């Protein structure tokens, strides 16, 4: 049975690194504990049965395809939670580094049983978050030179939001709102309930005067109404490219360019990335960065210490 390393006994440099990356290290530690409890409710029966208690090994985490790594610090934390001070983590690349097949992204050394017990949980974090970072980096590359920036959404895996949004930052993207509380986002159902885009906008502005408010529109008439009402953040939902281009021109004609920010969202595919960005929108939000991303293929290969 694993005796998890308590938070206060973890390497302070690793915890500081997570915090510097915008993560709550205590929350990450708790997340890792839950993940390990799910994977090892009693003990790693295969490793206990096949590997001598005093055996030691070195493991190389290698990239098996090209991509952008993220979550390697969390993977390192997994090994420290399982093995405490009896593990050495070296040669770890910085999150956000672009890698090629065969690159070693991290090396671990310690008791063989413990390395194998921690392996899958560490890989689950690193592979998934690297997949998010890789997908984000591809969108960032596709938009290079257009002025449009890539945003994530709230379409995240439950309990993984902070981690996935961290991975988006590693890939060069920006974060949209983190929760329902830190920013108002008036969507179609709010508009219906409030009786229109302007009543909905004004209701939020009155209730939360200091909060950022973005309103979703589906046509140019709604956009005109909001511009007249003073709204400065508008989401263009499921609009054809030519309509988005007209929305940008409408903002320019009102003299609000630079002050009013337009976000394109809904049904956007990677093939349309530059086409949409060329309309002049400020942001392109992509739910697929987090809700259906492919993992980056990483693996751990052991050899004797």
Image: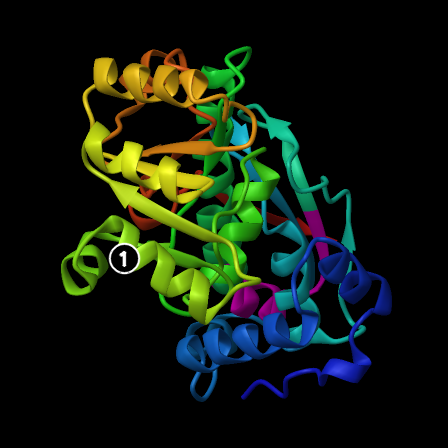
Q: Residue at x 61, y 64 (%)?
A: 115
What colour scheme governs how the chains and residues are painted in the rendered image of this protein? rainbow
Among the 4 quarters of the image, the one containing residue 192: bottom left
Q: Residues within 10 Å of mark 1 (few under 14, many from 20)?
A: some
Q: Residue at x 67, y 59 (%)?
A: 76
Magenta part, dominant SS: helix
Q: Residue at x 61, y 40 (%)?
A: 170
Establish if 2 lies above or below 190: below
Residue 257 percent across, percent down from the top left: 51, 23
| Quadrant, the C terminus | bottom right
Residue nearer the viewer, 142 or 197 = 197
| Quadrant, the N terminus | bottom right
Q: Residue at x 31, y 49 (%)?
A: 291
Establish if 269 lies above or below 69: above
Establish if 90 lies above or below 172: below
Q: Which residue is mark 1?
A: 199
Element at badge 1?
Answer: helix
**Would residue 170 appear left or right of 86 to someone viewing this image?**
left
- First to last magenta residue range: 107-120
**Would residue 225 appear left or right of 20 to someone viewing this image?**
left
Residue 142 percent across, percent down from the top left: 45, 16
Please count the marks in the image.
1
Q: Is residue 40 visible?
A: yes
Residue 71 part of the magenta segment: no
Among the 4 quarters of the image, the one containing residue 156: bottom left
Establish if 4 lies above or below 291: below
């Amino acid at each position: 049975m694993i005796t998890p390393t308590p938070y206060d006994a973890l390497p302070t440099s690793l915890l500081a690194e997570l915090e510097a990356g915008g993560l709550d290290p205590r929350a990450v530690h708790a997340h890792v504990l839950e993940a390990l409890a799910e994977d090892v409710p009693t003990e790693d029966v295969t490793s206990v049965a096949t590997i001598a208690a005093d055996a030691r090994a070195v493991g190389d985490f290698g990239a098996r395809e090209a991509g952008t790594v993220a979550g390697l610090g969390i993977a390192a934390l997994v090994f420290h939670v399982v093995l405490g001070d009896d593990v050495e983590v070296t040669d770890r690349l910085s999150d956000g580094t672009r890698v090629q097949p065969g690159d070693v992204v991290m090396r671990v050394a310690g008791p063989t049983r413990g390395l194998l017990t921690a392996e899958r949980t560490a890989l689950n974090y690193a592979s998934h978050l690297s997949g998010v970072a890789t997908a984000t980096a591809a969108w960032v590359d596709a938009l290079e030179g257009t002025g449009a920036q890539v945003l994530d959404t709230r379409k995240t895996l439950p309990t993984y939001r902070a981690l996935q949004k961290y991975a988006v930052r590693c890939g060069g993207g920006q974060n949209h709102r983190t929760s329902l509380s830190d920013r108002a986002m008036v969507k179609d159902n709010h508009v219906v309930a409030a009786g229109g885009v302007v009543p909905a906008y004004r209701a939020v502005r009155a209730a939360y005067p200091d909060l950022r408010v973005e309103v979703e529109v589906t046509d140019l008439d709604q956009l005109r109404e909001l511009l007249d009402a003073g709204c400065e953040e508008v989401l263009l939902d499921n609009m054809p490219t030519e309509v988005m281009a007209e929305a940008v021109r409408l903002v320019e004609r009102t003299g609000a360019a630079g002050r009013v920010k337009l976000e394109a969202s809904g049904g956007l595919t990677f093939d349309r990335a530059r086409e949409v960005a060329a309309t002049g929108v400020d942001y392109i939000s992509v739910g697929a960065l987090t809700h259906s991303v492919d993992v980056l293929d990483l693996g751990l290969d052991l050899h004797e210490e």
